[in-house]
Image: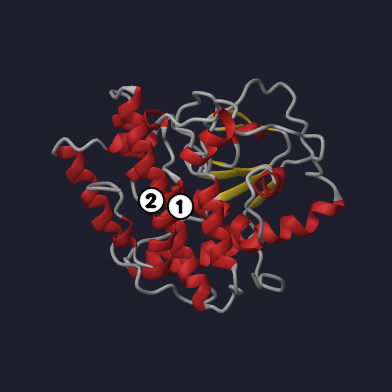
Amino acid sequence: MLWRGRRQSDNIEDQRSDSGGGLGGGLGGSPGQFRIPIGGRAGGGSSIILVILVVLAGWYFGFDPSQILGDGSGGLVPGGGGQITEDNSSQDGGSPASDEMKQFVATVLAETEDTWTGIFKSEGLTYEDPKLVLFSGKVRSACGFASAAAGPFYCPGDHKVYLDMTFFQQLDQQFGASGEFARAYVIAHEVGHHVQNLTGIMGKFNQMRQSMGEVEANQMSVRIELQADCFAGVWAHYTQQKGILEQGDIESALNAAKQIGDDTLQKKMQGYVVPESFNHGTSQQRQTWLARGYKSGKLTDCNTLSGAI
């Protein structure tokens, strides 16, 4: 990914020097969290409004959109169950060695800002840039306390993406998903949740999931997470048009999507899969929706909220 020398976002909050003292536990059942993850205009956005209408129609006619929310963690990877190992032994969140990685994160965030600003403008809407909080070990968000073990996540309560950059090491060493664009996919996925929040999708589902059972909520969570994957693909579509991507970048992101599928993670961590507990989607589903967004660049092709997924 040709990111060096490009604009970096000012919407980075670096809290890595904060020890996180007094923060207890992990993401757990903290309500409302969603874990995971263009220099000019981003055209062809299709209709954000259409997506919202589909969601509202599903809600009115008995469709179960709140399943998308799952445990409300809003991140790239399934949390809990020991699926992500918290290892701070190699943590260098505040060291000079991590400066380049911070620059990378700021550049990717800037690219998402440019892309989504263009897409929203094409629909007569205004995009609100999210903040991205870099933390080390533990962090307090408007959605509650979180530890690095939960992985990157988005909190709709404060419109912020939270990232402990040691997750990138885990992505490479633990999940077998290396490459800069695999890391960019992590950020773009979480920003995808922000788009869902701005368009009202996330709020409606959070409301509905309160009356759902665990299995039903998990099923809807899968749909939300797959849509965030598709939105990440839409961003990648316009990033590719700018000539930023290099050979192998998309394959790197698709491999990351494969490695963090519910079925792949469960097989790796416990030796068997429990489909009823899936809340992020299978490896095949995640790859399919990421690729779909990338190929079309259209939000209307990211309708995971009805029909088969």
Which residue: 43% across, 72% down?
A: 42
Q: Are marks 1 and 2 in contact (CB under 8 Å)?
A: yes
**Residue position for label 2:** 227
Q: Label 2 amino acid?
A: Gln
Q: Identify which residue, 73 or 197, lies in the foreground.
A: 73
Which residue: 66% across, 70% down?
A: 3
In which quadrant of the rendered image does the N terminus lie?
Answer: bottom right
Which residue: 30% across, 29% down?
A: 216
In the orientation shown, which residue stands out farthest toward the front?
271
Q: Identify which residue, 51 or 168, lies in the foreground.
A: 168
Residue 7, placed above or below residue 213: below
Residue 79, placed above or below residue 301: above
Upstream in sequence: badge 1 or badge 2 = 1
Which mark, residue 192? 1
Mark 2 lies on a secondary structure that is helix
Q: Label 1 amino acid?
A: Gly
Residue 130 pos. (x, y %): 53, 51
